[in-house]
């Protein structure tokens, strides 16, 4: 046993406790092969990022689960790691280069630029890891992985080759989402849609050799430079005569056909649709069906290219303005309509995405969709909460082929090699320099893979796949994936189909979804609002336990949460409460015995606290098993604060000081047992303070972290004693409340008469509690009590009477009330006099008179109340 400082000082103990846990090897899964495994792989944070509140929540929930399962006897493994985060990291380094050296990546060239990124990674990559440690994360750091380390890179190669060999990866000229600022393709998941006010411009296209024309409407008039047809519905009688005829594209002069295609909705707009195969995904498909030319009119920076004639060199919006002006001048612009539409934005930089036809690599999704949906529909993978199943299935059912090439340098370079000699392409698991077909020199594809291509393999690549490692055999498939709902499409879905395709197994059995951390007013935390809270600052100020507690409080699966100062302060107060309770216990301890006394030696209050503790224990286990992390914590909070500290400790204080050594030690053993149990139950939530206290108290395991998590114990069920004590505590609470309402000081003692049928609950020993906790001078339990003037308090188990005279000094109170009555009478007289004065009543405004009348009524009411009270004193 050691002395505890007066206050808990997280800064002085957290680092050393963390080091102790790590050095002892507690973060590693137990070697014992007979133990069931429990595995979580961390959603890898961006390697150059910093811990934000979203991470803090994500990691806290994972650590709670992993510590819980470890204490439950599982071989628990939490695999940590970081993601190279292609675009995000490259943008940061490019920005840095531009600001500090005025250079672009092209000035440096690929090799030198990548050296810079690696240097950046080496400099900042450990920061996020250190921050994860500060939070108390019990990851096995010896298994730390990085999406671009050798093992994971070879997994990426293997998957690319596997899919390519099965015909599930192909290179094609397709419409992709293009970010002109990041100058790269984006997958559908990387486009965020926002409503914007725009216009519908109605443009007239003349029919060649006639006075006729058709009118098309567009939100992006600059794309007309690339139009290669106008389409109508084949069943639209208004236009059937035009199908096959030729139109003259205004401003450009190109001759384009009118084609008939089911894709056109007759009811929408004029029923005529301009077709720009190079700049719209639907038009691209129409173009394929009608063998139309694909004319791309913009370059990678979204500037008009040579195909755009006089508009060449203009930015897309500049060109739009110029084209509209020219259309108007030429009499082609029929009308301009206001129109609110959804505009796709790059998820990284917010630039409006331009759909472009481009040569890219794709994963063919078709054959992989059904198994990934079935795994969830058949319950092999479960979403918590269940409602996210629908979102997942909906996303999967509407999945297009996945564009996986990115025009970046930072990432896994596409393992395709081109030979300019024979023109053949070779996809290879290893780098090659020589063409296997002709022996000519080859060059590797310039592009890299989408960051999510490697993250999709994370649950099995981190465990050693494609090698049949021990870890893979022992820990895969993993158990729970903890993640936010915002990356179900980016990540969760891709891990599921990738794992099923590559390993034939589900990557995890449960997806535990959490919401976002919002500010106190419920707003998203963002740089622009300046309302972000830095978790590291919170840890520095309040300690990691307080942050974890605040994040877990009220947490319910799938729902956003608010983070406020009140929450963090409540967390700190709770830590102090436990600390003080443990200090009190420690100061009164004369025994080292961590076991419980025999049941017959236990008093009613002992059985009560043990029984309540046992029930809470069983509920907490059940709640955590159901991922009700917040519910479990609030039960623990109430138990520790209210039941244990405010009741049990108060109830047994006299026994601790008692001459009866055996009774005193029995009380000590119970309080030590319950306190230690509560610390263990709380440990996954608040690892540091619970360990610090555990170490100070007599304990039987080296560390609380590897002690057994408390579970329901039949021997600790004392339902009768629990019910009796519940009746007593309820009565005491009711008396206290009434006394507080009446403003009676606790020092003012009064005789308590209890009328009850439950004589057992209100036994001799219970009377002591009333004296100690309900300011009772004496307690009489009776079957009847008659005193009309007594204060009566009713609880389900009893009617309680306290003679009023014992609560207040009747004579003094009577005098005070009589004085008060005189004063009120005076006021009444004054107002009555005023109101009977003709002069006042005729001159004063109606509102003033009305006000006086109301005052009079309220004084009269007050007087009546005082007189009633005085009458009761007799
Ligand atoms: Zn961008
Ligand atoms: Zn060749």
Image (tube, grey):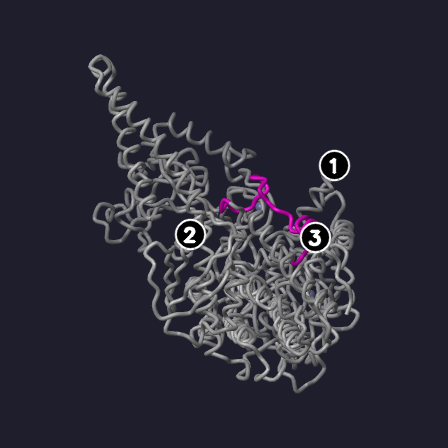
- The residue at 38%/46% (across/down) is 229
Quadrant in which residue 162 is drawn:
bottom right
Residue 300 visible, this orientation: no
Find numbered disc 3 in the image and state the secondary structure of the residue it sits on. Answer: loop
Find numbered disc 2 in the image and state the secondary structure of the residue it sits on. Answer: helix
* Along the viewing direction, whichever of 590 and 155 lies nearer the viewer: 590
* Along the viewing direction, whichever of 15 and 442 lies nearer the viewer: 15
Main secondary structure of the magenta stretch: loop
Residue 666 visible, this orientation: yes
Residue 102, numbered circle: 1
> Of circles 3 and 1, which is in front?
3
Q: Is residue 482 magenta?
A: no
- The residue at 33%/62% (across/down) is 786
Q: Quadrant of ligand 2?
A: bottom right
| Residue named by callout 2 | 805
> Of circles 3 and 2, which is in front?
2
Mark with earlier residue (1, 2): 1
Residue 48, numbered circle: 3
Q: Is residue 131 left or right of residue 493?
A: right
Instruction: Give percent across and percent down for residue 482.
Output: 56, 65
């Amino acid at each position: 046993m050691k002395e505890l400082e007066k206050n808990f000082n997280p800064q002085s103990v957290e680092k050393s406790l963390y080091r102790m846990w790590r050095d002892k090897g507690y973060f590693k899964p137990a070697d014992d092969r007979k133990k069931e495994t429990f595995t979580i792989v961390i959603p890898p944070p961006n390697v150059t990022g910093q811990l934000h509140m979203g991470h803090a929540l994500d990691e806290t929930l994972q650590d709670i689960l992993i510590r819980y399962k470890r204490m439950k006897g599982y071989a628990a493994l939490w695999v940590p790691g970081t993601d190279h985060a292609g675009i995000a990291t490259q943008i940061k380094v490019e920005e840095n280069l531009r600001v500090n050296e005025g250079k672009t990546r092209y000035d440096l060239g690929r090799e030198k630029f990548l050296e810079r990124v690696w240097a950046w990674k080496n400099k900042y990559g450990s920061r996020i890891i250190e921050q994860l440690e500060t939070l108390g994360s019990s990851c096995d750091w010896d298994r730390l992985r990085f999406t671009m380390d050798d093992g994971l890179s070879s997994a990426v190669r293997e998957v690319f080759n596997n899919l390519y060999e099965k015909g599930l990866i192909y290179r094609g000229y397709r419409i992709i989402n293009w970010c002109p600022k990041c100058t790269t393709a984006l997958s559908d998941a990387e486009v965020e849609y926002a409503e914007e006010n725009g216009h519908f411009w109605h443009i007239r296209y003349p029919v060649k050799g006639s006075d006729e024309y058709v009118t098309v409407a567009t939100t992006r008039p600059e794309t007309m430079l690339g139009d290669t047809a106008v389409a109508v519905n084949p069943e639209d009688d208004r236009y059937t005569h035009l199908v096959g005829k030729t139109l003259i594209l205004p401003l450009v002069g190109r001759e384009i056909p009118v084609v008939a295609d089911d894709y056109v909705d007759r009811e929408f707009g004029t029923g005529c649709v301009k077709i720009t195969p190079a700049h719209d995904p639907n038009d691209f498909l129409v173009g394929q069906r009608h063998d139309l030319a694909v004319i791309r009119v913009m370059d990678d920076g979204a500037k008009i290219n040579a195909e755009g004639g006089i508009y060449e060199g203009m930015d897309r919006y500049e060109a739009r303005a110029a084209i509209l002006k020219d259309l108007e001048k030429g009499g082609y612009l029929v009308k301009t309509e206001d129109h609110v539409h959804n505009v796709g934005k790059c998820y990284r930089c917010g630039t409006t995405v331009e759909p472009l036809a481009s040569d890219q690599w794709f994963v063919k999704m078709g054959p992989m969709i059904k198994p990934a949906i079935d795994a969830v529909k058949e319950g092999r993978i479960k979403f918590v909460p269940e409602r996210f199943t629908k979102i997942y299935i909906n996303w999967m059912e509407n999945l297009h082929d996945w564009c996986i090439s990115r025009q970046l340098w930072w990432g896994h370079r596409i393992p395709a090699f081109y030979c300019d000699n024979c023109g053949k392409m070779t996809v290879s698991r290893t780098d090659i320099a020589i063409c296997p077909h002709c022996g000519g020199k080859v060059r590797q594809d310039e592009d890299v893979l989408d960051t999510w291509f490697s993250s999709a393999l994370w649950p099995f690549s981190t465990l050693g796949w494609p090698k049949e490692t021990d870890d893979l055999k022992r820990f895969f498939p993993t158990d729970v994936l903890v993640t936010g709902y915002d990356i179900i499409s980016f990540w969760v879905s891709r891990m599921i189909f990738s794992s099923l395709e590559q390993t034939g197994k589900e990557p995890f059995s449960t997806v535990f979804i959490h919401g976002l951390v919002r500010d106190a007013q419920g707003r998203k935390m963002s740089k622009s609002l300046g309302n972000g809270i830095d978790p590291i600052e919170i840890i520095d100020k309040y300690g990691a336990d307080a942050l974890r507690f605040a994040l877990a409080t009220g947490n319910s699966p799938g729902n956003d949460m608010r983070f406020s100062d009140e929450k963090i302060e409540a967390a700190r107060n709770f830590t102090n409460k436990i600390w003080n309770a443990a200090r009190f216990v420690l100061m009164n301890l004369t025994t080292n015995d961590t076991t419980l006394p025999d049941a017959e030696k236990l008093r009613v209050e002992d059985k009560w606290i043990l029984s309540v503790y046992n029930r809470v224990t069983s509920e907490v286990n059940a709640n955590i098993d159901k991922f009700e992390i917040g519910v479990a914590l609030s039960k623990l909070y109430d138990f520790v604060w209210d039941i244990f500290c405010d009741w049990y400790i108060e109830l047994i204080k006299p026994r601790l000081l008692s001459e009866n050594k055996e009774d005193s030690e029995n009380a000590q053993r119970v309080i030590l047992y319950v306190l230690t149990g509560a610390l263990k139950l709380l440990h996954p939530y608040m690892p540091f303070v619970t360990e610090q206290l555990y170490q100070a108290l007599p304990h039987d395991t080296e560390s609380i972290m590897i002690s057994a998590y408390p579970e329901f114990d039949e021997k600790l069920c004392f339902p009768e004693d629990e019910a009796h004590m519940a009746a007593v505590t309820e009565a005491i609470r009711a008396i206290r409340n009434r006394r507080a309402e009446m403003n009676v000081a606790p020092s003012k003692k009064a005789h308590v008469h209890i009328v009850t049928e439950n004589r057992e609950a209100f036994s001799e020993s219970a009377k002591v509690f009333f004296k100690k906790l309900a300011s009772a001078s004496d307690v009489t339990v009776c079957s009847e009590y008659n005193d009309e003037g007594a204060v009566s308090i009713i609880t389900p188990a009893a009617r309680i009477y306290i003679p009023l005279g014992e609560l207040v000094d009747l004579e003094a109170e009577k005098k005070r009330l009589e004085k008060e009555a005189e004063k009120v009478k005076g006021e009444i007289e004054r107002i009555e006099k005023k109101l009977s004065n003709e002069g006042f009543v005729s001159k004063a405004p109606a509102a003033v008179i009305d006000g006086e009348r109301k005052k009079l009524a309220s004084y009269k009411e007050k007087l009546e109340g005082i007189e009633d009270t005085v009458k009761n004193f007799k």
